[in-house]
């Protein structure tokens, strides 16, 4: 169960990162509320998961999911540059996250 919660918390990290950009410096109320709620649930999920997953593993997996999700969102929805090098780096992050889960 902790791993499922950790993955969901990582996805919520992507949500709050995207919402943070959309707040335009916390000047837009709806994205600000989305940011705050997603952040609270993301951190809560991380805290719950770390009851049974080691700190380093849990945090690295959470950050990895959030980083890859945010980068993919940027490329797919925001027009960020897509290149073989960027995709390779994201694949390496995913490989590291999977490795941490397998070796846990």
Image (tube, helix red, strand yellow):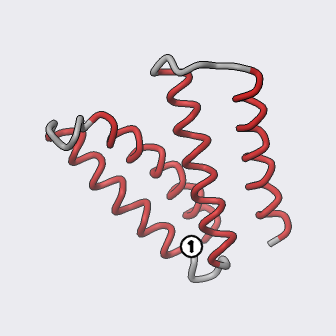
Tell me what residue is drawn at x 66 percent, y 73 percent: 56
Q: Is residue 55 left or right of residue 48?
A: right
Badge 1 density bin: few <14, some 14–19, many ≥20, Cα 10 Å = many
In the rendered image, residue 72, in percent from the top left (x then y), is placed at 58, 31
Residue that mark 1 sits on = 49
- The image quadrant where one finds the N terminus is bottom right
- Kindly indicate the quadrant of the structure image that contains residue 78: top left
Reply above or below: 41 against 32: below
In this rendering, the answer to whether 43 lies above or below 78 is below
**Residue 70 on image: x %, y %:** 52, 38
SS label for mark 1: helix
The C terminus lies in quadrant:
bottom right
User: Could you say where residue 50 lies in the image, as x and y percent from the top left?
Assistant: 57, 77
**Residue sitting at 47 percent across and 67 percent down?**
45
Total tally of numbered discs in the picture? 1
Q: With respect to residue 35, does 62 lie above or below?
A: below
At x 55%, y 48%, the residue is 66
Please give left or right for residue 21 compared with residue 74 in the image: left
Residue at (29%, 34%) from the top-left corner? 22
Q: Position of residue 9 (x, y in %)?
A: 50, 58
User: Residue furthest toward the bottom?
Assistant: 51
Q: Is residue 58 left or right of residue 25?
A: right
Of 48 and 97, which appears nearest the observer?
97
Q: Is residue 94 above or below residue 90?
A: below
């Amino acid at each position: 169960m902790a791993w499922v919660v950790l993955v969901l918390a990582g996805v919520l990290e992507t949500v709050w990162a995207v919402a943070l950009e959309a707040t335009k410096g916390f000047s837009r109320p709806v994205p600000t509320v989305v940011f705050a709620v997603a952040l609270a649930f993301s951190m809560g999920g991380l805290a719950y998961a770390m009851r049974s997953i080691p700190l380093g593993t849990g945090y690295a997996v959470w950050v990895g999911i959030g980083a890859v999700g945010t980068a993919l969102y940027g490329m797919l929805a925001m027009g960020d540059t897509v290149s073989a090098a960027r995709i390779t780096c994201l694949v390496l992050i995913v490989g590291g996250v999977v490795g941490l889960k397998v070796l846990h």
